[in-house]
Amino acid sequence: MVRTRFCSDQPGGTVQVMRVTYHKLVRDQIPAIIAADGHQPVTRVLDDAGYEAALRAKLLEEAHEAQAAPDGKLASELADVLEVLQALAAAHDMGWEEVVSEASRKRGERGGFDQRIFLEYVDQAR
């Protein structure tokens, strides 16, 4: 969206403003980085329910970015996924150790992904 704003200190008195809408959770320093770049971020602080919902959406966003990342960018994208996982656990009053313990328990019960097994289909007798 491009908006025209009247500005008395500009020649001609107007300036074109383009609004880019994001509607997503961002890292804490992003608004300051945007402002330092000469732009005007508009933000709000989420309540608990909104924060938890935004974290879940952010997890999907970051997972998709990791999925699409070239090998050279994968570590950076996985770091973003990890950051969101840690924040989501904390938002639900879980310690990171609890998440790691649960992962270990599940690995013990069902295994990991070390053997690279890809399930094609299952024939079920009726």
Image (cartoon, helix red, strand yellow):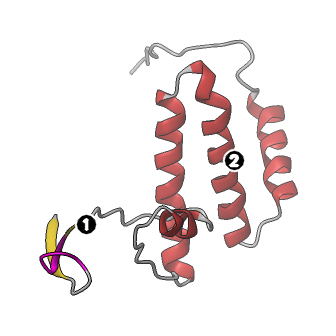
Tell me the residue at 50%/56% (across/down).
58
Which residue is farthest front?
A: 11
Q: Is residue 93 left or right of residue 126?
A: right
Q: Nearer the viewer, residue 6 or 116?
A: 6
Tell me the residue at 53%/84% (across/down).
47
Q: Nearer the viewer, residue 47 or 36?
A: 36
Answer with the quarter of the image where residue 94 lies.
bottom right
Is label 2 in a helix, a strand or a loop?
helix
Is label 1 in a helix, a strand or a loop?
loop
Mark 2 surroundings: few (<14), some (14-19) or many (≥20) residues within 10 A: some
Tell me the residue at 21%/87% (across/down).
8
Residue span colored magenta = 10-15
Location of the C terminus (image quadrant): top left
Q: Nearer the viewer, residue 14 or 118?
A: 14
The correct choice, above or below, for 80 with respect to 15 in the image is above
Q: Which mark is residue 19?
A: 1
Q: Which residue is mark 2?
A: 82
> Which is the main secondary structure of the residues drawn in magenta?
loop
Answer with the quarter of the image where residue 117 lies.
top right
Answer with the quarter of the image where residue 71 lies.
top right
Q: CA distance from mark 1 to mark 2?
A: 30 Å
